[in-house]
């Protein structure tokens, strides 16, 4: 997987190119894939539709992961497997969630994790735990 050009595997479809949140998330995921090769397995294995809504900004996007491909769409498309609702600042803060050394799970002892508890609402997480964990690892700069 080390030779894949990830910039060609992340697409901003249609109006998503004008969605600041979609651009930020696409850039963050691309940067993490380039700088942290261990995250590439999560990207390859993730097959889910995930909506992210920045409630305070009135902005939404849908991430469609299909195994080594990601399409970002403006707004909520279809019925997503998982929906994340938070403020724009909290969505940015999600990238700072520390991961545990073993298993790369969100570390509940981290200050960013504690700050986000109760403020970020994730719908569908219990039915799609692997997808939520993979997304968390892809978004985390740690």
Image: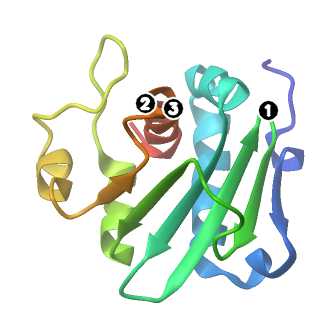
Q: Are marks 2 and 3 in contact (CB under 8 Å)?
A: no
Q: How many marks?
A: 3
Check disc 2: other Cα within 10 Å, few if <14, some if 14-19, many if 20+.
few
- Is 98 in front, or is 79? 79
Residue under pointer 2: 129
Q: Position of residue 106 (x, y in %)?
A: 28, 33
- Is 27 in front, or is 115? 115
Q: Nearer the viewer, mark 2 or mark 3?
A: 2
Is residue 123 positioned above or below 44 on the image?
A: below
Q: Which quadrant would residue 13 be assigned to in this image? A: bottom right
Q: Position of residue 37 (x, y in %)?
A: 62, 23
- Secondary structure beneath label 1: loop
* Residue 68, disc: 1
Q: Is residue 4 left or right of residue 119?
A: right
- Secondary structure beneath label 2: helix
Residue drawn 68% across the image and 24% down it? 45
* Residue 114, disc: none
Residue under pointer 3: 134
Q: Is residue 125 left or right of residue 135?
A: left
Residue drawn 65% across the image and 76% down it? 75
As measured in the structure, the alpha-carbon distance from the residue carrying label 2 to the one carrying label 3 is 9 Å
Residue drawn 30% across the image and 59% down it? 121
Residue drawn 28% across the image and 37% down it? 98
Is residue 131 positioned above or below 75 on the image?
A: above
Query: Which part of the image, by quadrant, shows the N terminus?
Result: top right
Query: Which part of the image, by quadrant, shows the C terminus?
Result: top left
Q: Position of residue 123 (x, y in %)?
A: 39, 53
- Secondary structure beneath label 3: helix
Q: Is residue 66 left or right of residue 88?
A: right
Q: Earlier in the sequence, mark 3 or mark 1?
A: 1
As measured in the structure, the alpha-carbon distance from the residue carrying label 3 to the one carrying label 1 is 13 Å
Q: Position of residue 69 (x, y in %)?
A: 81, 40
């Amino acid at each position: 997987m080390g030779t894949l050009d990830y910039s060609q595997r992340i697409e901003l479809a249609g109006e998503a190119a004008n969605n600041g949140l979609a651009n930020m998330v696409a850039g963050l995921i691309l940067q993490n894939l380039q700088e942290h090769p261990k995250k590439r397995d999560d990207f390859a294995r993730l097959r889910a539709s995930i909506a992210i809504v920045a409630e305070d900004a009135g902005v939404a996007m849908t991430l469609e992961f299909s195994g080594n491909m990601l399409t970002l769409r403006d707004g909520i498309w279809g019925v997503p497997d998982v929906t994340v609702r938070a403020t724009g600042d909290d969505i940015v803060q999600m990238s700072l969630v520390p991961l545990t050394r073993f298993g790369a799970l969100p570390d509940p002892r981290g200050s960013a994790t504690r700050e986000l508890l109760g403020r970020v609402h994730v719908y569908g997480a219990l039915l799609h735990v692997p997808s939520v964990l993979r997304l968390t690892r892809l978004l985390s700069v740690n």
